[in-house]
Amino acid sequence: MQADLHMHSTASDGGYSPAKLMEKCKEAGLHIVALTDHDTTNGVKEAQAAGKQLNLTVIPGIELSTKWKGKSVHMLGYGVNIEDAAFQEVLEGQRQMRNKRMEVMLERLQGAGVTLQEEDVLRYVDGGSVGRPHVAKALIDRGYVKEVSEAFDKYLGEGKPAYVSKAKEFTPEEAISLIHKAGGLAVVAHPGYYGLDEDIEKWVHQSGLDGVEIEHRDHDPEERKHYEKLTSKLEKETNKTLLRTGGSDFHHEEYGRKKEPLGVTTISGEKAEILLRAIEKRHSSQTSG
């Protein structure tokens, strides 16, 4: 039994609707999946309804953007209560911030001789959270670039003409707290991107970080060994079990540093079951508390 606990739909910056994405998960032989769209849970209900029809277990999730030491650090939340009003209010604020950021990006693109309209970008957003990949798709559509990676290399990546940092981003600690308040478990996403081992240790010890994403499409075997070792070390220090998650970070087949279809980067059903039990335990403790 295989699982993929990190993927995106058109509710944020993925290429497939939540329902279509679940169909692709079924075709790829997956059994347990988590929808972890950026800063939104708008696709979760559709994914869960489709998953029920397809006999897939769909975990409600989210991927929150944070900033730490000048780096973009992503925090995954699993088992969040998508009906939590306070949680949704904060997410709506994040989405509004992303919309303002897009407007500035379009102004900067104009200054670089590239003309895009808001509607060129928003047609890819599907009512969710707008991000740079949506702008990249619009650039492809208008013939300015041939693929997403070229859009980032020329215009949208850090230090490029149309890059705009977010006005106010969560710290990792704030994201962990937000996930916990919404009844979820917090896991640091693709730590191999950051080189922040000492900070991960601090987040586990001081902020209650629940786990580490060890398996990721961009983690090589050495990185996977390294983060397994770090997680084991932290378990001994804290005397608590930490989650070991993993997934493809799938957006669509043409996305990413390493392009791959669903079903290539997975984790065992056993590890996904551990996550499911941990979510159930968190929910029952909050209910009884």
Image (cartoon, rainbow, N blue to C red):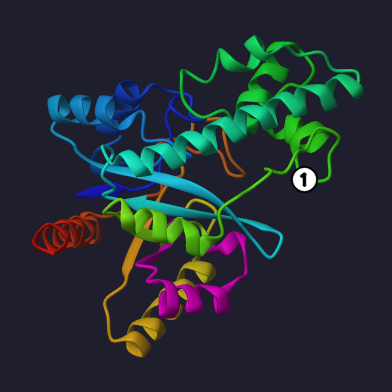
* Position in image of residue 199 (x %, y %): 56, 74
Residue at 47% x, 34% y is: 92
Q: What residue type is labelled 1?
A: Glu
Identify whether 283 is placed above or below 7.
Answer: below
Image quadrant in which the C terminus is located: bottom left
Name the residue that disc number 1 marks: 158
Residue at 75% x, 14% y is: 116
For residue 164, what is the image quadrant?
Answer: top right
* Position in image of residue 174 (x %, y %): 49, 59
Residue 242 left/right relative to 277: right
Residue 155 appears in view: yes
Residue 35 appears in view: no
Q: What stretch is highlighted in magenta?
A: 191-215
Residue 201 left/right relative to 132: left
* Position in image of residue 244 (x %, y %): 34, 65
* Position in image of residue 217 (x %, y %): 49, 51
Residue furthest to the bottom: 237
Number of labels in the image equals 1
Residue furthest to the left: 288
Residue at 82% x, 13% y is: 115
Residue 33 left/right relative to 201: left
For residue 18, what is the image quadrant?
Answer: top left
Task: Label 1: state its secondary structure.
Answer: loop
20, 181: nearer the viewer: 181
Residue 132: in magenta span: no
